[in-house]
Image: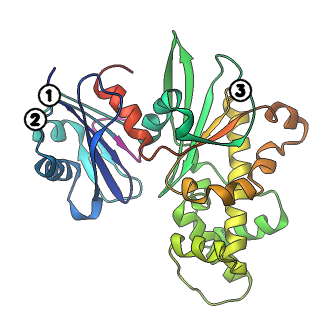
Amino acid sequence: MTAPGLIADIGGTNARFALVPPGASQGQQPLTLACADFPGPAEAALAYLRKVAPPAPPARAAFAVACPVLADSVAMTNHAWRFSIEEVRQTLSLERLEVVNDFIAVALAVPHLQAADQATICPGRSAPGAPIAVAGPGTGLGVSLLVPRQGRWQAIASEGGHVTMAAQTAREDAILAWLRQHFDHVSAERVLSGPGLANIHAALRGLAGLPPQPLAPADITGQALAGEPLARESLDLFFAFLGTFCGNLALTLGARGGLALAGGILPRLLPALKASAFAERFRDKGRFRDWLAPLPVDLVTHPYPAFVGLAGLVNGEI
């Protein structure tokens, strides 16, 4: 095989493409395209290939998408794209196209990341051969699980981001009650994502009797880091909710191998995350506090972790 493989990490906002030469473990010539600029992934991929002009057209591709992948027909959760995997394969003249949930790709990357690609949030020690939970807020809330199988890691797809969000304090109860007036189901993703941070901020304004003030998540985090009280509380609550959710996840999945945090939000907020209530809330499970206490929690800081997992898929190494 001399032609490179084509990989893509497709979220609710952007599609990130790269080429993978045979045997390579990293994507090359990465380029980010806005999903809104194209009617579907095939058109975005063709635009990418025109820009980078590979020496030979790709014959294999692996795409990660931020939604369930259950059959040939794929419907993005947080974007309007709807597409057939087979039709995309034919449009791109590929011999093989593998499409997986985005957090499958992120999870597959975790065992192959270097120390420089991660930051310790909770020090600990992984139990040998134990499952590893993977979760991360971005446009949505991704969840996956890594389990050892015959000397390799297998990633299990999950829609755990859509479980019902639980509260641990009266303040959180009030926020979730306010959100239930606006959503038919207050999932974890409704608070643990970019839009989720905006939902928390809106709830706090509503509970305070303040008029709506729609703000982008980046504006809220910027104000929070500058010390604005309501934005600061919104971010503090975001981290606390995240700790509760991740502790629940580790217990549910039996993740004695630890937890890997990922997604586009947390790496930009690393100091605030470390200083937050996340670690305490992660362990705060009553009689099972000692079960959670030794579990390591690391934040993936690699700029394109899904590319690492997709590189292994496109080259048939994972």
Can residue 296 be found in the magenta stretch?
A: no
Type of amino acid under label 1? Ala
* Disc 2 and disc 1 in contact, CB within 8 angstroms: yes
What number is the disc on residue 3?
1
Could you tell me which residue is drawn at 10 percent across and 35 percent down? 57
Disc 2 target residue: 57
Residue located at (22% from left, 53% from top) = 40
Q: Is 104 left or right of 59, judged from the image as shown?
A: right
Colour pattern: rainbow
Q: x%, y% of residue 208?
A: 74, 85
The amino acid at mark 3 is: Arg
Query: Hey, which quadrant is residue 266 in on the image?
Result: bottom right
**Residue 53 can be seen in this image:** yes
Classified by dominant secondary structure, the portion drawn in magenta counts as: loop
The mark nearer the N terminus, 2 or 1, is 1
Q: Is residue 118 above or below residue 189?
A: above
Q: Quadrant of the N terminus?
A: top left
Q: Which residue is mark 3?
A: 256
Circle 3 or circle 2, nearest the eye: 2
Q: Which element type, helix, strand or loop, lies under badge 3?
A: loop
Residue drawn at x 48%, y 43% as measured from the top left: 302
| Magenta extent | 64-72
**Location of the C terminus (image quadrant):** top left
Task: Tell me how far mark 2 sits from mark 1, CA to CA.
Answer: 6 Å
Q: Using a 10 Å C-alpha cutoff, classify the residue at mark 1 as few (fewer than 14 neighbours), some (14 to 19) or many (20 or more).
A: some
